[in-house]
């Protein structure tokens, strides 16, 4: 009988393959996205030194206050805008987008498009 791998295991393997293709540098850090069933997380990482430069999530009180729900497309779009604004404050405009093994649709796509509209280039 053929055993089927779990979705989280498949996503983890995809993410490892993606991370082998690119990494964040000081000039062009990596915008990493993670979504759970209840929240979304985004952080901008410089992989050469292993530092998180900017982070935002739907768990933060200022973000959560603006949202009705924390796990829908509207919340993802708002989070994309917030992470882009924080990045611009730190002087970051160019990033590499790391979708974290998730399919580029729905919440991940909404976050990416909102970040682009708010001024990030990727």
Image (tube, rainbow, N blue to C red):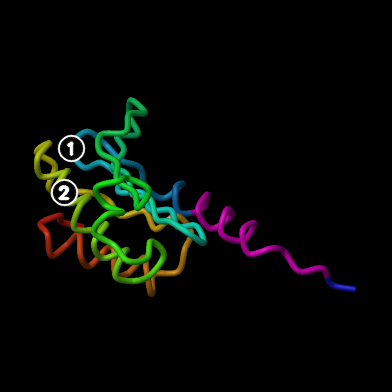
Q: Which residue is drawn at 17% across and 62% down?
A: 116
Residue linked to disc 1: 27
Give the CA distance from mark 2 to mark 1: 8 Å
User: 34 left or right of 7?
Assistant: left
Number of numbered discs visible in the structure rendering: 2
Q: Quadrant of the N terminus?
A: bottom right
Q: Residue at x 41, y 64 (%)?
A: 71
Q: Mark 2 points at which residue?
A: 94
Residue 3 vs residue 37: left or right? right
Magenta stretch, main secondary structure, is helix
Q: Residue 63: x, y in percent?
A: 26, 52
Task: Tell me if residue 121 comes above or below residue 62 in the rendering.
Answer: below
Q: CB of mark 2 within 8 Å of CB of mark 1?
A: yes
Within 10 Å of disc 1 (Cα), the crowding (few <14, some 14-19, many 20+) is few
Q: Residue furthest right?
A: 1
The image shows residue 50, relative to residue 84, as above or below, that is above
Judge from the rendering whether residue 27 lies leftward or rightward of residue 112; answer left or right: left
- Which range is magenta? 3-17
Please tell me which residue lies in front, 33 or 20.
33
* Circle 2 crowding by C-alpha within 10 Å: few under 14, some 14–19, many from 20: some
**Which x, y percent locates residue 60?**
32, 45
Q: What residue lies at 32% left-to-right and 29% top-to-bottom?
A: 51
């Amino acid at each position: 009988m053929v055993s089927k791998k779990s979705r989280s295991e498949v996503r983890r393997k995809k993410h490892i393959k993606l991370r082998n293709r690119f990494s964040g540098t000081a000039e062009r850090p990596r915008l990493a996205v993670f979504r759970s069933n209840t929240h979304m997380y985004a952080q901008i990482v410089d992989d050469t030194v292993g530092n998180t430069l900017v982070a935002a999530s739907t768990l933060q009180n200022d973000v959560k206050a603006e949202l009705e729900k924390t796990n829908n497309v509207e919340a993802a779009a708002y989070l994309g805008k917030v992470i882009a604004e924080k990045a611009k404050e730190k002087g970051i405009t160019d990033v590499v987008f790391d979708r974290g093994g998730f399919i580029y649709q729905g919440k991940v796509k909404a976050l990416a498009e909102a970040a682009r509209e708010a001024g990030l280039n990727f």
